[in-house]
Amino acid sequence: MTAHFDAKKKRQLARSGVFESFDFVVREPDMRVAAVRARRDQLIQNIKEQIELATNKNYAPVKYKWVSDVNGNFRRAAVPVRIKQWWLELLDGRVQISVFHKGKPVKLRGECNAIQIEDLSELVPTLELLRLSVELGDFDTLLSA
């Protein structure tokens, strides 16, 4: 009877080459992955708004609110949203771009919290590169701190 159980155990340990070729890891918690993805998506959306603000001076995003009139009737109204401009043009023509997360500038490297470019013509390409960098995950550790 003991030999019978030993035979089953030997069959269970035998694996194919395909199974052995897999890279086995401990699964990441779903909440952690979702949180990182949410921060990343929010920052990408904010960068897209900055690009739109830089390319279109008449850009005015709106949010919709329920407001009541004097008779007490409720209606949905578009209310403009104020967007803080992430770039600052210096007196010598150079431009500094800060990345904001939750209303505060992100420290990009050490104590540095801005990227300096030569003039406004480089603003949109630099913002596009920032968006790509966020999509690649370069800002994940900066946003979690």
Image: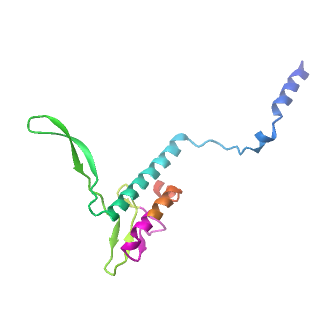
The answer to which image quadrant residue 64 occupies is: top left
The answer to which image quadrant residue 11 occupies is: top right
Horizontal side of residue 43 vs 137, given as left or right: left
In the rendered image, residue 110 lying in the magenta stretch gets the answer yes
The answer to which image quadrant residue 15 occupies is: top right
Counting from the top left corner in percent of width and height, residue 25 is at: 67, 44
Horizontal side of residue 28 vs 90, given as left or right: right
Q: Which residue is situated farthest in the top direction here?
A: 1
Task: Determine the residue positioned at 47% across, 64% down.
Answer: 129
Counting from the top left corner in percent of width and height, residue 10 is at: 86, 30
The total of numbered circles placed on residues is 0
Task: Determine the residue positioned at 59% across, 43% down.
Answer: 28
Task: Determine the residue positioned at 50% across, 56% down.
Answer: 135
- Image: magenta residue range: 106-127
> In this orientation, which residue lies closer to the viewer: 112 or 83?
83
In the rendered image, residue 22 lying in the magenta stretch gets the answer no
